[in-house]
Image (spheres, rainbow, N blue to C red):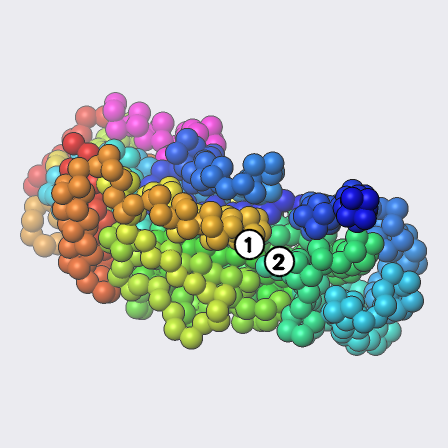
Amino acid sequence: MAKHIVFYVHGMGQHDTAWAEDAGGPVETLRRASTAYAHFGDRPLDTLVEVVPVRYDEIFRAAVERWRRGAEPVAALDPDDAFGRALGVLAGASEQSFFWSHAADVVMYRCLGWYRELVRAHVIQQIAERVERAWAEEGTARCSVVAHSLGTAVAHDSLHLLGTRRWGNAASPFHPSHWRFQHVVMVANTSRLLQTPTAEAAPAYGSIVRPGPVEDAGSYCATYLNVRHSFDPVPQPRRFDPVGWRKEYSTVVVDHFRDPNVHGFSHYLRNPRVHVPILRRLTRSAAVTPAEEVREIEAFPQIDAAEPLERARAHLLDLQAVALEAGDDPAPPRLTRMLAALFTLVERYRQ
Amino acid sequence: MTRTATPRVLALLLALTVGTPAAVAAQRVDVLAWRSDTADAASYRQATHRYRPQIATYDYGAVFRALLAELERSPRWTRRERVYAGLHGALSEIAARFDAFDATLRQTDDVPGAVERFLATTPTGLFQQVDEGWFRAEQRVTFDEVEALPDSQALDFLERQHAVERLLTDFRAPARAHTLRAIQLAAERWRTFVEGGRSAYPWEVWLNDRGPLRVRYDVETPPRRQWIVAHPELGVEVATTGRWLSDATAAEAMLVHLLGHVWYRWKQPAAPSAGLGWHGVSLAATLQNSTGPGLGVTAMYGPVVTAGAIWHDVDGDGRWLERPPQVVLGIDLYRLARGAREEMPRALVKRAAVAEALAGAATPTPPERE
């Protein structure tokens, strides 16, 4: 059989073309984690899985750069300050600022429909082209999606559109009655927080991005794994927590501390409670034995011994307070403040 | 001694001959490592060779019925195996579904149309391998079940399953090509619209999606029109004190499109990257230090032309129209940020250069006061 194709969808922030395979990135983290299990001794993960990094952040970067280049000279010509701070803010847009490099991605995806559609079309194109190549070369396509943070909302919306739309006003081979994804893994899931129900998109609980059997028109994957960190504020508002879904849906909640940025993609994947079910899905359920799983989980305490315990605990509680402050359904300004507070706490801890 | 040793020797010989249970398991077919043997009669390659005439005429129903008959005649199966039952049940279901396609195809020469209509109503995903197995419900066959079979049966199952899945993928080929092209066009349209359309600041994008200003769009179709709201850009106001162009003076100004509207057209609908054309109008204002604010109208035609007439109430008596208007040219610097400067239309570069030269060379001259 051909390799399992895994689409990695990134979250907010800057990501280059090979982002997934960067040192310390999600692919390397999973690869390193896999070496703890005997199955991968003579079958390294790379021989079983093909990584396809999906990228869309360049759309946000280009938009911010266009706004900055447009506003910069005009701001100097605003003798009466008619635009108040708006032009100054745009003219001062810089990748050095957390808002423009990270939070703006979330706000733009949530609030600016044109950029949302461009991101979706761009992501759908990347996925569809790879799937079509697999169909043409192998006659089959075994594909899964592993998404993180903002990427979970992007992946959710893109998959729903890919599977439900009559592209070019014709029956689509991507419809779930003809083809489906193997596994969907959502890490720090924001698909409900950022959902934008429109005529073509569906809310996170009402879409086809849910598990189901082959040919079922109402589902688009075999299994759905939802991963959340108790102290990560990002997936807390409008938490993704469906009721009554099939048993192929599961949630993993973790609370470990290995880095002050508990929201980080790789920070999640380092935990065996997270990477074991992912490795099993991407390869074989028998790839990690129950004994190996128990061994690795027992060897993975909540807080790494190298960390100052009290400081780490205080940091986790601060993060929890940020989530509580944001509330259950934050409007974009409050959501932005929550992201900024997360960033500030992480920076403060690192100093 | 001999009596006790003999069974041990026999057991050892037997173990070496047939292998221990662990060794036997290790020799089993590994589904994930399996590759099709193109020489196998059940393989996709051999099946497509055998049924080439039927495939050429899109008579897939006949192909699936023939594959079903071959399975039923296969000496590799006793017909009592659960795996056989799953495969047989699934293949029977596919063959039965394609009876409807055959009936449709007999009534038309439009094969892509018939395939499209069939796919719109009939599932064809039954043979896709999903989550360590195939098929569904009572037909479900798992990796473990296949790997537990004798090699000859396991390999036969994998070849037959793969052949049918691949034939179904081939059957969908016209729809695959159409859909992929539609997806690529959608992405191309949106890229062209966002990067090459009339510039829009964040508040404009937001307002174009709200209330009375909402414009229609979806993932395949960007807006065909656009509201311009409080859009500032670099402008040059040109005033003439005499009859000749040499008498003109130009002043850099902030040109604000207070409220405007733009209509789009694709230059080549089948190739969106060829670009967007547009025309539009706006109510505009200029802000500059020398002559004070001005009000007027502008017209836009594509990325190159933004020009209008601006009136100033120079003496502050509230009579804006008592003096002839000044010409204003807009320079959409936002568009210059698309990326490489060489990507810009030559005319736009030229226009920006002319405007810069005008603004730089001319000394702003306030109109004479009465």
Q: Is residue B320 left or right of residue A219?
A: left
What's the residue at 74%, 66% (across, down)?
B83
Q: Chain of mark 2?
A: B
Quarter of the image that includes the C terminus of chain B: top left
Q: Nearer the viewer, residue B172 or A253?
A: A253
Badge 1, how many Cα within 10 Å: few under 14, some, many 20+? some
Q: Is the residue A78 above or below the residue B117 in the image?
A: above
Q: SS of the residue at dot 2?
A: loop
The image shows residue B153 at horizontal and vertical percentages of 81, 58
Q: CA distance from mark 2 to mark 1?
A: 8 Å
Res A51 quadrant in image: top right
Chain at numbered mark 1? A
- In which image quadrant can residue B119 be found? bottom right
* Position of residue B233 measured from the top left corner of the image (x, y, whole percent): 27, 41
According to the picture, the residue beneath numbered tag 2 turns out to be: B132
Q: Is residue B163 above or below residue B115?
A: above
> Residue B61 in the image: x percent, y percent?
84, 69
Q: Quadrant of residue B328?
A: top left
Which segment is the magenta one?
B336-361
Q: Are marks 2 and 1 in contact (CB under 8 Å)?
A: yes
Which residue is tagged 1?
A: A285
Which residue does the image show at 45% across and 72% down from the upper left?
A245
- The residue mark sitting in front, 2 or 1, is 1
Marks 2 and 1 belong to one chain: no
In the structure shown, which secondary structural element does the residue marked by tag 1 occupy?
loop
